[in-house]
Amino acid sequence: MAMHRFSLCCVVLLVLAPLAAVAWRPWPPRNGSGEVEGIGASKKFEGSSDFVKLQYHMGPVLAADITVHPIWYGRWPAEQKRTIRAFLRSLSPPGSASGDGGIPSPSVAAWWRTVRLYTDQTSANVSGVVRLGREKCDARASRGGRLTRLDIQSVVRDAVTARTRPLPVDSSGVYLVLTSPEVVVENFCGQVCGFHYFTFPSVVGYTLPYAWVGNSAARCPEVCAYPFAIPSYVGDGVGGRKFLVQWVWNPILSYCSGPNALDQ
């Protein structure tokens, strides 16, 4: 429940505006003295699930059930994995056709019901079911500790073509690549905290939705975990589990609302 309350404190509709290749990074606003401003004033918006009017560009909206396949790249402690799994499961917990499982608000499921209000040109709503799929772990970081954006697609390819326990080829799923703190990804922290797109058949062999999120706990929490971490404040003492959660939902939300479909 604590994680549910935490999740709703984020700006949940931050990037309902995915373009062809989406990347995001929130810069905390600062006043003339260089201090972060607006923390107190912004609290009145915490937990808000007001429907935001977006312009629809006739792109696809994922209305079918979504399966998220995590790919753990690098060394990931078990407690961090449990936190991410719990968040993914909480989007549409079992026990209810509407996907809320009878959980009272505020909750992640209640927030997702707001996301579901968006529709495509046929009036089909965003998917109400997000499932945790199969997982793949590359603890040895087989492609090295420094990755380009294109290398992320190679990580996906390795996961779906592995000799042992390969991930299924799932065109309606999302392959979520999660890099550990010691892994450096191109432009991470300097320009992006994560991104999502579709894999190239020339690289992976298939066109598959995928996303990448980096663990910013040690590298740039004040950038990629804002407003839950600023230089003088740390949101969670256990290795940045909460830092990562807010960026995990970002690509999931964006894919369900549809790349090239909605923006503000």
Image (cartoon, rainbow, N blue to C red):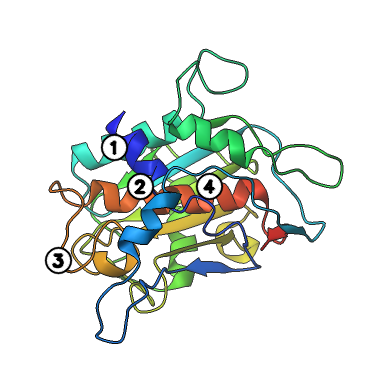
Residue tagged 4: 252
Identity, as a three-letter code, of the amino acid under mark 4: Ile
Q: At 43% from the left edge and 31% from the top edge, which residue is drawn?
A: 106
Identity, as a three-letter code, of the amino acid under mark 1: Thr
Measuring from the top left, give residue 214's x and y in whole percent: 34, 60
Q: Is residue 155 above or below residue 35?
A: above
Q: CA distance from mark 4 to mark 1?
A: 16 Å
Q: CA distance from mark 3 to mark 4?
A: 30 Å
Identity, as a three-letter code, of the amino acid under mark 2: Val
Of labels 3 and 4, the one closer to you = 3
Residue tagged 3: 232
Query: Depth check: 5 or 187 in front?
Result: 5
Image check: 99 left or right of 55? left
Q: Sequence order check: which comes first, mark 4 or mark 1?
A: 1
Measuring from the top left, give residue 118's x and y in whole percent: 71, 44
Q: Sequence order check: which comes first, mark 4 or mark 2?
A: 2
Of labels 3 and 2, the one closer to you = 3
Q: At 79% from the left edge and 37% from the top edge, which residue is drawn?
A: 124
